[in-house]
Each structure stands twice: as structure tokens, then as C-alpha cells.
Amino acid sequence: MKGQPNRLGIDKQHGFHGTEIDRSKPLKFHLDGRTISGFAGDTVLSAALASGIDMVGEFDGQPIGLSGRFSPAMTQRRGKAAQTLPMQRTPALDGAEFHTFGGRLRRLRLPAFGNKRRSLQQNLDRAALASPWHDQQPHALITTDVVVVGGGVAGMIAALAAARTGASVTLLEASPLLGGSARYFGSQEGDETPDQTISQLSAAIAVTDAITVILRAQVLAVHSGRVRAHRVLVDGTTVTGEVIDLAAPRIILATGAIERLPVFPGNRQPRVMTTLEAYLLAERYGVWLGRSAILATVHSAAYRLPMLLTDAGVATQKIADSRTDPQSRFIEFSRAYGIMQAGGTIPALAAPAAKGLGLSVTLQLFFDGYAAHAEAPVPTDLLLVCGGWQPDLTLWHMAGGRSRWNAERHRIEPIGALPQMALAGSAAGHFSKHACLLSGQDAVDKLFGAPRTPVVELTIDPAYETLDAPTPKVPRSETTEQVSYLDAGLNLIQPPDPRPSTKRPWWPFRRPEPTWSLADQPRSLGIVDVAAGVQLGGIPVESAGIVAQERTVASGDLIDAARLALLPDLRPAPPAPRVPAFLVGRFGPEQQVWMVAPAEPRILPVGALIFVNSDQSDSRQAIGAVVGHDGDSAIALIGKASPHAGEGLTLRDQGRSIAIRLVEPVAPPQSSPTFSGVPSPA
Amino acid sequence: MSEAPADFAVVGSTPLARLVAGLLAGVHGKRVIWVGDSHAAFRLPRGIDLSVGPMTRPESWALLSQAVPETVKLLAKAGGKASTMRLDPIFFADTPIGQQAMAFVCSSAAGFSAAIEPLPSEHLGKGREGIVLRDALYLQRDRLEPVLDRWLEGLGVTRLPLVQVRLTIAPNGSASMDLEGKVTEATRAILADDEAILGHLPPEAVASLFYRQAMTTILTEPTFPLAARVMLQIDADLSFTQGSHGGVIAIGAGGHDACVSHIGVLLGANRQLRQAGGNSHDSLRSHDGAPIVGSINGTGPELLAGLGATGAFLAPALARWFVGAATTDELAYFAARIPGRPMAHSTVADYAPHAALAAA
């Protein structure tokens, strides 16, 4: 296909023709002035990837790959922040002009070559990728009985079950279609296929009037009874984004799971891609980067991908599995395809290939948690990685939900409950499609007080289906420029640098001791960042849930939140009390309130201390202080024994002694000063 | 044969708890168990450590002026010099009550090596009064924590993780710590921060001694530089600390929404503030605004509470107090601030933001 080097052909029978695109309707649009080719049904992201753009820009001197979880915001007209759009949710439109938004490098009008041809040229050192829609004001308020967040199979069945109770339901899905990631995982023996399940559920939803489906809608925040989302709308040749609020007494979070990124140097290089993202790009849009691949996984379902690729003409050079002797029917099938498999092997390094767009990948043997012999680097077009799965609890935490680390499953799992809110599917920690479907029904049962639906996993004995291994992690090496990151999301957080200083402790230019402070990272963290932090030993297991709750927050405008939360109290502040509570007994038990006057006309400032004579300056020797004013007169608290009118004293103001005299006692306040408003001590 | 009990079990995860534990062991030769966690590198802070505070009593400034140089030397000796920072924090107040208190902060601090300058009103905004306190010391907890942990290890202080240990405190103030079946004991327990007190003092004792203040910590994404790296709004008991990356950590009284509202009003006039993290927690305040130091009626665990941001800098004096080696001034200061003192007409009362907030 002309202009689309990364679009799979359709000359063979395979499963990656692209279910969402219409190849009979080619289109062209411009992105930062560059012509991008695609098909009707593409997103801007899928078309850009198909056209050979696979890099966002550089960070810390290293190229960073383009993906659905890491792509810049853009506008359809230059410089309008209010109309920013996400690449992965915006449909490609013929003739449209899109411009990336943010820290783009100043671009000369010269032909791009080398890495620039494949890059969106974002200066990631200057500005992190932003999601400006987080700061937009809501355009509309939609009232509904139930909001279901996530249009996978669990969310779909939850929407149907809620509608059966007579409730109005709004189903929000971030991608352009329902179904989620069920197809990636395949089916178990005797179970219907994901295609069958999704088709049935989609058909049922389509004929259920009580369900409103909003696609391309990413939920930004969940608060009690309220959901804020950003959706992309298409009107002819114009695409707009808008923020909407949904008020709903019941909320179901079916947000799925996020694929973990193995932590190794070069893990965010262009053409290092997580398996689910690669699968969805191929399945929905027929997009695939290159014609060869290496797969590194800890999870058995990932083995399906190389088999499907073989049919599409992509050669899988090797499957590296960190599990020493993994067992799975998928593994047996892929072996039958003749794909080379290597147990106990992890990715150790991905670096740009010496020539071309591909990678040079180094694999390493890995036994019992220890990395051993590194293999010779292998050139490949694409490194597919799967580091396991983390339930997406971002919104759960945002709403106040708690969680904890599951050491057996190597992931953060939800605990406890929230009023009027329920988790369903993978987000709730379930694995099989069967359990996800049951949990969707059960979430509705819980919220409506109906008898609960038992959620049973259809599991295969670990002897036949080996459990996932922990996400591999390889420390940074002295010999490589490549760095590793904790996750594939918007944050570019690197693991701690374990290299100790080689200088003596007293050496003035010594490198500081290695410290790794997530607390100092002024960005909200992704839940996968936290999970990786636990596995790297930077976050103790016991603190995983607390850190996740503290740091996986809505990244919205605080000022807007302030406006929403509590308008500032505009009542006038009360006047200061004549004798504040902190001066009770300060100058002795007999202290009295007096009017005082300076020997020469001047203002006596509040707080100035009063002494018996000018020789004294230690504030502990003070016998009184100015506490306020009554017209032009100063009011003071005096703790001296037997004070009398006309008596001379000394006041100190900024180190200077000022002669004053007592004028007359002032009637004490009606009630003795005390700590009003504070519960009385026992 | 069972091991002899240690002299002290210091419970708490703040720099104050660590410093007291280390001083008891290193300077006073006591056998010490420190029960605490190291989480400053990944948890959001619940307080700050600053060598100055909104104190309205001269004796507090006098004690602090003695203790700060000693603490600075101690930190340098422990290898923590790089974890401290000299800066000029700003205190400011918007309400008449807060401005009145700030005036007394200035006059009380005079003569105790605290250089305080009033800020012109145009620097802070209409109706707002502020002061800058020169050359204060700020502790960077995330950097200091590992340094102090190594220092404690070098002093032979036994460390037990608070999150894993089963801690039992007897009515006589002794402590028993069970870590996975291994039991260790200490003759006296010191509950050295709010979390330790809330976790291990009977609720009725907490209720009788303290006002429990809901607090919120908010971390923002990088924003424009504040007027100072550390700022303290006296009225709302709200501190702002801007980190090296430009993010601001705000710690303030009230629930999340109330705190967000305050922050938005105070900082948001000409800038965009985006939240990067947050937590809610409880803080303990005495009813009279003064610190609470010592044991209830001379029995039970020793309590350290209400010391505010300056607590860590009082560690040398506190350690001497616990071993009976306090100076006359220290003895008088701490003896007047023991738990159970009369609160309604306290003779050691200090500015209590919670009381001011409630009055407002």
C-alpha cells in the first residue's frame, strides 16, 4: 500500500485485515503538515503508525515510541487548547489538518530524514505529554441511573443486567467499539468464542433503549455519584472533544487490566510494543510494524499472537518466556507452528539497529530470579513484550477505594467496598471471560441489593496452564546508553540507578548516594508505575495500596476542583479577639487589659512587648503586650502587680525602646477568653 | 535465657523519632529499639521539618535557639548535611486573628537569633500580611531518611518495622514488640509522632488529651515558582513546599475538598495547578496549642505531640529530658507541657490554628 508501509496486506487469508477499516475508502490527512495515508475507520494514531510514524520524540537523549498509551494531544486547528484531541480516539478524516499540541521542536521547513521521518518530534525534555482535556470545563450534565465505565464483556453484561432492573444506563467506552480485549485472550475449551459473546452482547445492547452507549469517551474522574468523561464527537469533517459530567447514584467500574511493561534498558524504544496493543492495532486496523518479531512474555495467551502473525506473513524469530518450563495449550500450538521457544529467558536490552528502523534485541537467561548469560544481539523489526497484567484500579482509587499487593499474582488488587460503586471483570481481579461475565452481573446485584451471583473462575490446573511469572526486571548496565522505564504510560519514570558512587564519602564532587524518590515526582503515577515500584523494591509490599491510592489521582485543574468542591467562604473574617486564647495566662494570673499611650505620638503595633524598664530586652521578661487598638488608643495586656494609671513602662518595637504609660484599665470582656470552638478537654 | 529489655522503644517514622532514638543510644548510652518505617521516598508527607514555626511564646524560641545549632551539628555528624537546606520561609496570614498571632510570633522571636522581616503587602496581595524568616533550616525527608537509618544502624539501635510489628504498651509505659514470633521488650515506650499515638494510645486517652484535626496533603504538578520554597499560611494551618522539580506539596487542615479550596484560592490566581497526588490523615493538636511532652500522670508511654514543624530540631533537648539530664530551662519548659495539664486556662498556651479556624 502506497504510503502505508506498516499496513498488512490482504492477499492472504489471515485475521489481521482490520475489522474497523474500509480499504475501499482510502483517505489522506495532514499531521503537523505531513501527509498521512489511511482508510475510513482508522484513528489518527493507527493511520500514523501505518504510515511509518512510530516515534513521539526524544527524552533524556533517547527516542520514545508512539503508542496508544503514549501519544501527544493534537488540535484540528493550530493553537486552540480548548479543542485538543487524543490521537488514539480521534477518527482519521479525509482532508483534515491536525497539529500536535505541546512541546514540539521548532521545525524548519526542510525535508525530514533519518529518525525525523518516523518521529512526531516532541521535545519531551521540555514538556511532558499533556492531556489538556483534564482541565476543560464540562459541556453537559447527563443524569442517569447507572454509569458503567468500560465496554468490555464485563461492562457490557453489567449494562444489560442494570437495564433489566428498569434503570437507565450509560455505558462509556474509550475505544471506538465495544468488546474490550476479550478477543486477545481467546476462549477456553467448551466455552463460546469471544466473537460470539461480543456479538450477542452488542446485539442485545443495540435493542435495549434504556442503554446509551458513548464511544470514544475516556473517563477522567470518578467522585461519589459523579463521573467526568472526555468524548470525541465527529460532525462531517470536523472532530471536536468535549468534557461531560454524568450524575448517577450507581457506578460500575469495568476498566479492565493494563499490560505490564518488562523493565529493561530500551523498553520504550520505538518498535517495542506490548502484545495487547499490537494485537488490537492488527486486528482492528491491519497495522503491523515490520515483517519480523521477537516475543518476550510471562503470560501464555501472548503465544496466540505469533500464530496469528504467521498467517499474516510476519515471522516470529523467537518466543522468550521468563518461566523456565511453561505449560499451556497455546504453547503447544505455537510449537506446532515451528516457532522457536526459549524458556527462562527475558529481554535484557533493546537498542536501535545499526541499519534500518528495527531493533537489536539482546535476550538473557533468567533462573530463579537471577539474570545469567546474555545471548548475542538479534536484529528484528519489532519486540513484542508482555510483563503480565495489572487490574486498572485508577478510578477505584480516585473514588476512595483501597487495594493491596497480591504477592502470588504480583499485582495490586482491590479490597473492601465503596458505597454505590462496584468493580467488575478484570478490574475486580478476575481472569477468565466466564468469571468476568458473572462479575458484571454480580456488580449489578450488589448495587441493587439483589441476591449475589457467585463468581466462579474457569481455571485450568497449573500443571497444564502455568501461572504468570513476575514482570521481568533487568538493572541498568554501565555499558549501555539505553534506559528503562516502569511503564508504557504517560509518565517516564525510570527505576532507581543502582550504581554506587566510586568516590570516597568526603570527596566534594562525589555523586550523591543513589536515592529514588517517587514522593518527589511531581506527576500523578499510573498504577503500573506503583506495581513496578513494588517489584523493584522501591515501595514496600505493605505500602503498595497506600501509595497507589495517594498517587493514582485525577490529574485535573485544582482551581476548577476548588470551584466544584467548596466555594471559598466569602463572609468577612471575624475580628481578632481583644485577648487571644494564646495569651491566656501569658503574663501571669493577674493580667489585666489597659489602655496605654506612648510618650510621643506614634502607633504602638500589635504584638509589641512591654517591659518594666528599658534595660530589659529578653522577651521572656515582658510583663505585657499590645493586643489591639481602640480608635487611636492602644490596648495592652498587662501582667504587672498593682498597676496604676500614669505608671511608666517601656515598649520594644523592632529593637527600639519606646516610653509608654498606662492610661486606664479597660473593662474585661464579657466572658473569659478560652479556646472557643474547640471541644472541651475532659 | 530471655534478652534483657531495652531502655527505650521509640515509636514513630518522622525525623524527630529517629533523632530521639539515635541520641538516646549514641549520646546517652541507652539501649534503644526504634519502631518505625521508612517511607518518605514514596509516600506523601504528613508534615514538614523547619527550624522556625508560628510560635508566640518566647520560651519556645529560646529553647529552639539553643537546640537548632546542636541539631545541625548532629545532622552533619550523621552524614545528613546534604539533606538539609537553608532557606527563607514566608509566613503569612489573611485574617485578623492570624495577623494578630503573627505579630506575636515576631515579637516573641526577637532576640533569639531569628531574623524576621515584614514583607511589603504588595508582595503577597491585598489584605494579607506576611513575614520572611531568614536562614531557616529545612529537612528534606526523602533524602534524610536513609541517612538517619544508616546512622541508627551504626549506633546499634535495633530497628523494627512499625507496619509489621505487633506492639503492646503496658499501663506502666513499657513496650513489648512481637515481630513474627520474636518478642522484644523495652522499659519505656516513647510514642514520637501522631501516627504512633493514634495507633497505640487508648482512644479515650487520645480524646481527652488532643483535638483530632483532619488534614490533607496535596501534591501538584510543576507550577511557577512560589515566593519562597516554604510558605506557611497561619490562618488555615497550611504549608506549601515547592520541590526542585517545581511541584508543590500543600499540607493543610480540613478534608480534601476544603483543602483543595484553600489551595486554589491561595495559589491559583494566576497559575494553573494540577493535582499529582493526595492523601487524608489525622493530626493531633493539644487544646491549648502548646506541645504535649511526657507521660500521662507520670505513668504510661511518653508522648511527643503538638511540636509542629520544629519538633525535629528539639530532639537533643527532648532526649536529655527523657534521661533526666535536661538543663534547668529545658526542665521548666517540658514540665509545664506535660499531658493532663489544665487546658481551659492554660499558662503555656500558644497559637492554635484549629481554635482560630473554629472561631472563624
Image (cartoon, rainbow, N blue to C red):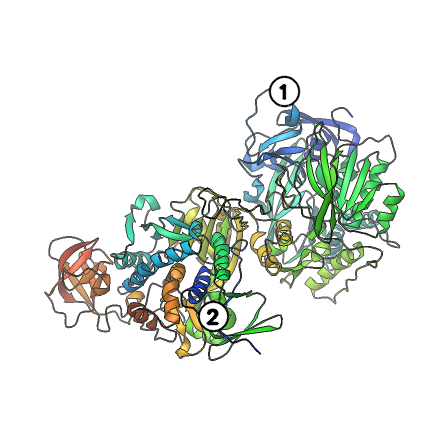
The part of the image, by quadrant, that contains residue B102 is bottom left
Residue B20, visible in the rendered structure? yes
Residue B236, visible in the rendered structure? no
**Residue A80 pos. (x, y %):** 55, 33
| Residue B31 numbered mark, or none | 2
Mark 2 is on which residue type?
A: Arg
Could you say which is closer to the camera, residue B109 or residue B104? Answer: B109
Q: Which residue is mark 1?
A: A111
| Chain under disc 1 | A
> Residue at the top extreme?
A110
Q: Using residue B170 as the reference point, say whether residue A389 is left or right of it.
A: right
Mark 1 is on which residue type?
A: Pro
**Residue A451 pos. (x, y %):** 74, 67
Query: Which residue sits at x=85%, y=53%?
Result: A188
**Residue A537 pos. (x, y %):** 61, 54
Q: Using residue A623 as the reference point, say whether residue A295 is left or right of it.
A: right
Q: Badges 2 and 1: C-beta atoms under 8 Å apart?
A: no
SS label for mark 1 = loop
How many numbered discs, if any? Answer: 2
SS label for mark 2 = loop
Q: Does residue A338 sit above or below B104 in this rendering?
A: above
